[in-house]
Amino acid sequence: MTIFEAVKSQVTPRMAAEHWGLMVGRNGMICCPFHEDRHPSLKLNEDYFYCFGCGAKGDVIDFTSRLLGLTEKEAAQKLAADFGIREVKPSVMAKLHAYKARADDEKHCSQVLREYLRILKDWKTAYAPPSPDAEPDLRFVEACHMLECTQYMVDLLELSPPNERAGIVEDMMKDGKIALLQERLDEIREDAHEQT
């Protein structure tokens, strides 16, 4: 957890405003310190603040940054110091486990995509209709429909820089594409086993 995340999870805009000596009403409203304000127009919500007068908005770090004239990093550090918050850094073992999990996911995605690509290439030639009038085999149709997209995904995974590859793999795993493709490969294997 970064210092930004730690501060945002433990300090609300209201807590910061009260800490800096601003008078907060029961409804969470204060006179906006960012413009001339005679009547409270800035609302301090649980996660963010918003001024109905000048439109100022943001989280607790933005509030402190604007109020004290600090950068966001300086504001986060000031809040952390004032409220006794420490940045929680992951251990070396946690980083190694996360790296291994990402590497395993990437390997799994690559294997599933490559196997499906190989099958599609085989199907495109083996099940091509003998004549234009012949009814196409469903495997040929699937190959025609999925070959280009699958080849693109394989290329994307193999040719992207490591930092982009991690995001691609995460998206594939998160949205279930690889799980669905794995199910399809299991069906194909089962059909092949039944035919022998």
Image: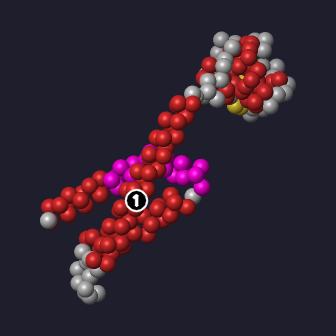
x%, y% of residue 117?
Answer: 38, 65
Q: Quadrant of residue 56?
A: top right
Viewer-proximal residue among 55 and 159: 159
x%, y% of residue 142?
Answer: 32, 68
- Vertical position of residue 40 compared to residue 132: above or below: above
Q: Quadrant of residue 44?
A: top right
The amino acid on which the numbered mark 1 sits, given as a three-letter code, is Leu
Q: Residue at x 78, y 12 (%)?
A: 21
Q: Residue at x 52, y 40 (%)?
A: 99
- Residue 63 makes an appearance in the image: no
Q: Is residue 177 left or right of residue 26?
A: left
Overall secondary structure of the magenta section: helix
195 inside magenta stretch? no
Q: Residue at x 39, y 48 (%)?
A: 176
x%, y% of residue 159?
Answer: 55, 61
Q: What segment carries the magenta color?
A: 161-182
- Vertical position of residue 172 compared to residue 189: above or below: above
Q: Is residue 84 left or right of residue 189?
A: right
